[in-house]
């Protein structure tokens, strides 16, 4: 009797152990996930492909990164899940749990929280795509990022950002930069590109535009005697995939005269002559010239106003415009017979 009871108890205990082991094994979900804390203001992450690199941008859109150790360095953790694809169609984004786990941690950067303080500030990093494109011509990339504060607490993950990675198009065959009166004229040969992105690399760093139809653009926010470096990127129709840049260096020298003045009116006053005119724009000062007979014009006065008074004379007065760097327009003279009588 005692042995029979012992056998029943042993079988029951063994069954319970097997059940518990099965349930515990069923509860496992693959690689461990980071321990998450409810730190507000998670960052956002975006990316695009340039040549054989994925350029990743992380920002907080001006929100203050929180935590109890705001003065300590923070860490940005980047998670990446890649999926080989058969064609240039990106599947629906996978669930967040599929991206954010320890096996997919590809980068961890230390930052000062102040680096993400302003709305237009961002952290950038680069991932090489060569090994992925050697395996498949098309890949789906899915990114997420989290912030770890100085105490080791980790924020909630950013929304998953998915983008397509494919064999990049060839760079533009040619691009040019030429100084014109209103700035720098940028032009390019489109080749097989369906769109061209133009970026200013020096002295600043910003996108000037993405152009689908035009083959030129005038960069008007330029300074005289300044060297600029432009990058031209080809897109062959796949969103977010650009070629390696075609670089153009250009030294902007303003040698273009301002527009001449117009509508000169000469009025004879009792003791002097009064000359008025209209500006053509982009002018710092005006010069009064007088021409007597067949001789060369003679400079008589300068002014920043749109009128001048000067002594009576039988010579023809004229006005030239001068811009801020000393370029001077042609002289516009009062027409014959317009002497104020």
Image: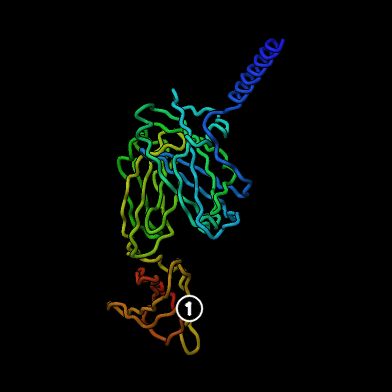
Across and down, in percent, residue 148 comes to 54, 49
Residue lying furthest bottom: 271
Location of the N terminus (image quadrant): top right
Q: Is residue 256 above or below residue 301?
A: above
Q: Is residue 171 above or below residue 250?
A: above
Horizontal placement of 71 versus 312: left or right? right
Q: Is residue 280 above or below residue 87?
A: below
Q: Identify which residue is drawn at 56% across, 58% down.
A: 70
Question: How has the structure been colored for display?
Answer: rainbow
Across and down, in percent, residue 291 comes to 33, 78
Q: Secondary structure at mark 1?
A: strand
Across and down, in percent, residue 200 comes to 40, 53
State which quadrant residue 259 falls in.
bottom left
Mark 1, other Cα within 10 Å: few <14 / some 14–19 / many ≥20: some
Q: Could you tell me how many numbered marks the image carries?
A: 1
State which quadrant residue 128 falls in.
top left
Residue lying furthest left: 295
* Residue that badge 1 annotates: 307
Q: Nearer the viewer, residue 295 or 133?
A: 133
Q: Nearer the viewer, residue 218 or 44?
A: 44
Q: Nearer the viewer, residue 205 or 325?
A: 205
Q: Identify which residue is drawn at 37% across, 34% down.
A: 168
Q: Identify which residue is drawn at 60% across, 56% down.
A: 68
Horizontal placement of 48 versus 228: left or right? right
State which quadrant residue 53 falls in.
top left
Across and down, in percent, residue 88 comes to 45, 27
């Amino acid at each position: 009797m005692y042995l029979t009871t012992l056998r029943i108890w042993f079988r029951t205990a063994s069954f319970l152990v097997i059940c518990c082991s099965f349930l515990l094994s069923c509860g496992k979900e693959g690689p461990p996930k980071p321990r998450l804390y409810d730190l507000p203001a998670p960052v956002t992450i975006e990316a695009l492909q340039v040549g054989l690199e994925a350029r990743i941008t992380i920002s907080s859109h001006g929100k203050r990164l929180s935590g109890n150790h705001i003065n300590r360095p923070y860490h940005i953790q980047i998670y990446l899940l890649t999926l080989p694809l058969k064609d240039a169609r990106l599947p629906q984004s996978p669930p967040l749990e599929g991206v954010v786990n320890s096996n997919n941690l590809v980068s961890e950067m230390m930052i000062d929280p102040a680096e993400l303080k302003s709305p237009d500030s961002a952290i950038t990093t680069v991932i090489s795509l060569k090994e992925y494109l050697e395996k498949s011509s098309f890949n789906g990339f899915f990114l997420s990022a989290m912030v770890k504060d100085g105490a080791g607490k980790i924020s909630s993950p950013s929304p998953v950002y998915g983008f397509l990675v494919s064999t990049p198009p060839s760079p533009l065959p040619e691009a040019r930069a030429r100084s014109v009166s209103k700035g720098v004229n940028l032009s390019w040969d489109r080749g097989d590109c369906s769109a061209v992105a133009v970026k200013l690399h020096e002295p600043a760093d910003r996108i000037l535009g993405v152009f689908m139809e035009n083959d030129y653009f005038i960069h008007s926010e330029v300074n005289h005697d300044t060297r600029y470096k432009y990058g031209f990127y080809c897109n062959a129709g796949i969103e977010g995939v650009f070629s390696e840049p075609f670089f153009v260096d250009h030294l902007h020298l303003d040698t273009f005269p301002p527009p001449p003045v117009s509508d000169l009116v000469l009025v004879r006053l009792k003791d002097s002559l009064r000359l008025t005119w209209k500006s053509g724009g982009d002018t710092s000062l005006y010069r009064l010239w007088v021409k007597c007979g067949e001789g060369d014009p003679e400079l008589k006065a300068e002014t920043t106003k749109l009128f001048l008074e000067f002594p009576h004379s039988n010579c023809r007065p004229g006005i030239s415009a001068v811009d801020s760097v000393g370029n001077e327009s042609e002289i516009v003279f009062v027409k014959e017979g317009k002497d104020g009588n």
